Amino acid sequence: MNIFEALRESHDRQRTYAVALIQTHGESEQRAEAYQQLKDELHAHETAEERFFYVPLMKLDGGVDLSRHAISEHHEMDELMEQLDETEMSSPAWLATAKKLADKVHHHLKEEEQKFFQVAGKLLEDQQKETLAGKYIKEFNEQLGEA
């Protein structure tokens, strides 16, 4: 498995959780569970991806700008989750913020897969792609265990 395949597995889960989240209603167990799944997935993914995809890319001239952009989008998603944590789940504002988060997740994943992966694919060596995948998966699983 290479780093792109490993990242896509989490991307698929993120899409599923984001869609499930915005289909929930009021302060329900379903909403709380959907949000927690997305939050845990995003936390583990962002941490592992930054350490074992974006940091190695930042060491290469062609990877600096895309890495900075992606990490700033991670920060935006984190801020939206902080807003959700501070808002009552039954509030209309909560769902509005959840929709912003879902939109940001979908935008970010599309941009990574259609733009960043192509650039990174040219910058990283094949062996490095496989090595990074193993490190990413290990870190991702450790982060999920801590979540």
Image (cartoon, rainbow, N blue to C red):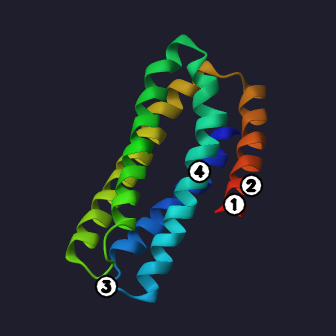
Q: Amino acid at mark 4?
A: His
* Circle 1: residue type: Glu
Helix, strand or loop at label 1? It is helix
Give the mark nearest the N terminus, 4 or 3.
3
Q: Badge 4, how many Cα within 10 Å: few under 14, some, many 20+?
A: many
Residue contact between numbered discs 1 and 2, judged by CB atoms under 8 Å: yes
Q: Which residue is mark 4?
A: 45
Q: CA distance from mark 1 to mark 2?
A: 6 Å
Q: Say if mark 4 contacts mark 3, CB within 8 Å.
A: no
Quick check: 108 left or right of 145? left
96 left or right of 24? left
Label located before the other in sequence (4 or 2): 4
Task: Name the residue tied to disc 2.
Answer: 142
The residue lying at 31 percent from left, 76 percent from top is 88
Q: Would you call the spot at circle 3 few (<14 residues within 10 Å), some (14-19), or many (20 or more)? A: some
Question: Which quarter shows the C terminus?
Answer: bottom right
